[in-house]
């Protein structure tokens, strides 16, 4: 609770400072981190709480981006297009869930991974509606560059806040209890009367709703989308790493992880264009080996204990 | 809704049947795990189900609780057909089970484990209420001091009792105990026997799937003997225990001799 409050206060402060003093680069970073918080928090609902390692984030993101983009090109108002994209993505998630949520573990992961590829191919081929591989240009939202940048920071941050609130509410709800039981022992969960099928689909749909809206806002923010960009597999992988980084199955974990991940992305990868995916791999290995419960696991005391155990006895203070 | 072949419970009967199986078969490829099984359990009975390994005891539990859909046959519980219904539906109708291999939610606290059963199968409205109900069941099962521990940290005996508490929190009419005493020492078994008697005293119908004869003899008024998927004996415990064929064929000759030696 206290931790959540502190992190929330810190996030609001950062948001306020950005809005008042941020230049274009800072605003862009702020919007990106808000998007990351949204994606990681949304993934955590299905991947963390329910324990179903979904790689469908890119599918939901791309579908949201294209649904909204096509709607906007046909003159539908911005807010309607964004909300509608979210709902259509959630509907898609329900259908996808009916198909693959009976699979467990690796099988589910692979099933979910394919979703983005299928959607990308459909988008590529259906040129008359999507523009195919050439991509889709979205109508400009109007206003000068700075107003636009601030608008997208506000909208994306609002979405991130909504996703975090939803995740927090979920942990205290019946569905939250059901998901935690499913993650730990699905057969036992069913025997104590949990409708596991419906619970998992609800989790996937809720998760996809936020990802879909994030995709829709992203499309308007970048003005131009193409299939290889919005269905990129890294959109599925990054939220998982962020959540692992911050702590799986907690509300604050994905938030902390998103900030930490963006920091790494900016510091290390921008300076190492050649080897940045190598760093990504090393990071995953290091996380799994040393910090399976995320950064939240780090305690000054435990590090000290670890150092003490490797020191020779006579060198110990 | 399914048709109700059993009709409404007949008012004239003193004790009505809670669970009725009619010609239930379960086939796994070439193996007939349950072969045209027909039996009934009366409200409030404590019945033992015995049989050698591979007799179909656990398959029986899985078929009744909805984990498996029987290949053929009809299962009626409390006036409703439950064969082929999903486990969560069957659980909410009032059939609870414990697992032979204990199945806690290891990262939830002991109390949260039981509260989850109360919340879903038990039909309790709120989480606060579920937590309160859980404490009652934990006290009943002697786990009140472990309520705040993670379930994964309990000893085997503790986890078996947790299974019982979860089963009770499901507010069952019928509780299937699948080898709830396996792996316990003598003192722990005596404690478990006391618990089983206390549960039966609450009017919950119990089916004990057991290897331990001591438990069956002390707890059950009636025994069913399963062998190769068929019900080969069904009668009062003392009668079945004296049935030489049952004893020698399914409990072993040495057990039969030991019983004769002990003068039972």
Image (cartoon, coloured by chain):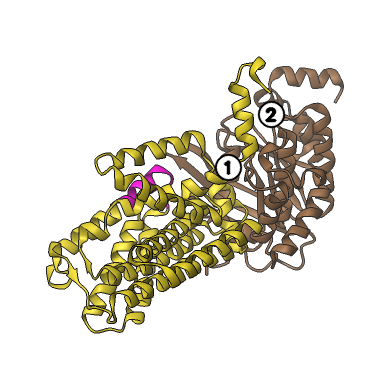
Chain colours: A yellow, B brown
State the extent of the magenta-drawn residues as a range.
A102-113
The residue beneath circle 1 is A297
Quarter of the picture containing the C terminus of chain A is top right
Q: Subunit of mark 2?
A: B
Outermost residue, right side: B263
Mark 1 secondary-structure assignment: helix
Compared to A103, does A161 lie above or below? below
- A248 part of magenta stretch: no
Residue B89: image location, x then y, percent:
57, 60
Marks 1/2: CA–CA distance? 58 Å
Tell me which residue sits at (60%, 44%) in the image: B61
Magenta span: helix, strand or loop, mainly? helix
Mark 2 secondary-structure assignment: helix
Q: Subunit of mark 1?
A: A
Which disc number belongs to residue B246? Answer: 2
Residue A157 occupies quadrant? bottom left
Residue B168: image location, x then y, percent:
74, 52
Residue A314 occupies quadrant? top right
Could you classify mark 1 by the number of other residues whose Cα lies within 10 Å: few (under 14), some (14-19), or many (20 or more)?
Answer: some
Residue B71 or A65: which is nearer the viewer? A65
Residue A24: image location, x then y, percent:
33, 67
């Amino acid at each position: 609770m206290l931790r959540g409050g502190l992190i929330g206060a810190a996030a609001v402060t950062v948001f306020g400072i950005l809005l008042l003093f941020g230049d274009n680069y800072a605003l862009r970073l702020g919007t990106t981190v808000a998007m990351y918080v949204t994606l990681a928090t949304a993934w955590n609902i299905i991947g963390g709480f329910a324990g179903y390692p979904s790689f469908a984030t890119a599918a939901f993101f791309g579908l949201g981006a294209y649904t909204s983009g096509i709607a906007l090109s046909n003159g539908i108002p911005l807010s309607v297009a964004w909300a509608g994209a979210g709902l259509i993505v959630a509907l898609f998630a329900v259908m996808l869930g009916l198909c693959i949520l009976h699979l467990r573990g690796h099988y589910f992961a692979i099933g979910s991974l394919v979703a983005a590829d299928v959607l990308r191919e459909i988008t590529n081929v259906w040129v008359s509606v999507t523009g195919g591989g050439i991509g889709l240009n979205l109508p400009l939202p109007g206003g000068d560059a700075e107003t636009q940048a601030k608008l997208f920071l506000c909208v994306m941050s609002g979405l991130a806040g909504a996703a975090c609130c939803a995740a927090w509410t979920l942990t205290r709800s019946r569905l939250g209890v059901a998901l935690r039981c499913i993650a730990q022992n699905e057969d036992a969960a069913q025997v104590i009367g949990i409708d596991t099928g419906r619970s998992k689909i609800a989790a996937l749909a809720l998760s996809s709703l936020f990802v879909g809206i994030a995709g829709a806002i992203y499309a308007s923010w970048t003005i131009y989308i193409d299939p290889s960009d919005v269905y990129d597999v890294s959109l599925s992988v990054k939220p998982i790493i962020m959540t692992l980084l911050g702590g799986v199955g907690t509300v604050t974990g994905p938030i902390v992880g998103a900030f930490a991940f963006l920091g790494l992305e900016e510091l290390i990868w921008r300076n190492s264009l050649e080897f940045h995916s190598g760093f990504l791999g090393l990071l995953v290995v290091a996380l799994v080996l040393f910090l399976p419960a995320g950064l939240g696991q780090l305690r000054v005391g435990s590090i000290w204990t670890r150092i003490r155990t490797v020191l020779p006895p006579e060198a110990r203070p | 809704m399914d048709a109700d072949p059993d009709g409404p419970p007949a008012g004239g009967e003193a004790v009505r049947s809670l669970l009725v199986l009619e010609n239930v078969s379960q086939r796994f490829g070439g193996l007939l795990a349950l072969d045209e099984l027909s039996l009934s359990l009366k409200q409030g009975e404590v019945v033992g189900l015995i049989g050698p390994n591979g007799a179909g005891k656990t398959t029986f539990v899985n078929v009744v609780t909805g984990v498996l859909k029987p290949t053929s046959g009809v299962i009626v519980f409390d006036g409703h057909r439950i064969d082929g219904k999903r486990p969560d539906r069957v659980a909410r109708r009032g059939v609870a089970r414990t697992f032979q291999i204990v199945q806690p939610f290891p990262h939830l606290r002991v109390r949260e484990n039981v509260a989850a059963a109360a919340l879903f199968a038990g039909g309790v409205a709120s989480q606060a209420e579920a937590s309160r109900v859980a404490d009652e069941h934990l006290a009943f099962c002697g786990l009140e001091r472990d309520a705040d521990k993670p379930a994964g940290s309990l000893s085997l005996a503790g986890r078996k009792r947790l299974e019982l508490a979860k089963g009770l929190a499901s507010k069952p009419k019928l509780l299937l105990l699948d080898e709830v005493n396996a792996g316990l020492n003598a003192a722990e078994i005596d404690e478990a026997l006391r618990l089983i008697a206390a549960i039966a005293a609450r009017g919950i119908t119990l089916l004990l799937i057991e290897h331990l004869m001591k438990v069956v003899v002390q707890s059950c008024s009636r025994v069913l003997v399963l062998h190769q998927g068929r019900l080969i004996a069904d009668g009062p415990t003392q009668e079945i225990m004296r049935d030489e064929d049952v004893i020698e064929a399914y409990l072993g000759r040495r057990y039969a001799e030991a019983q004769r030696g002990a003068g039972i």
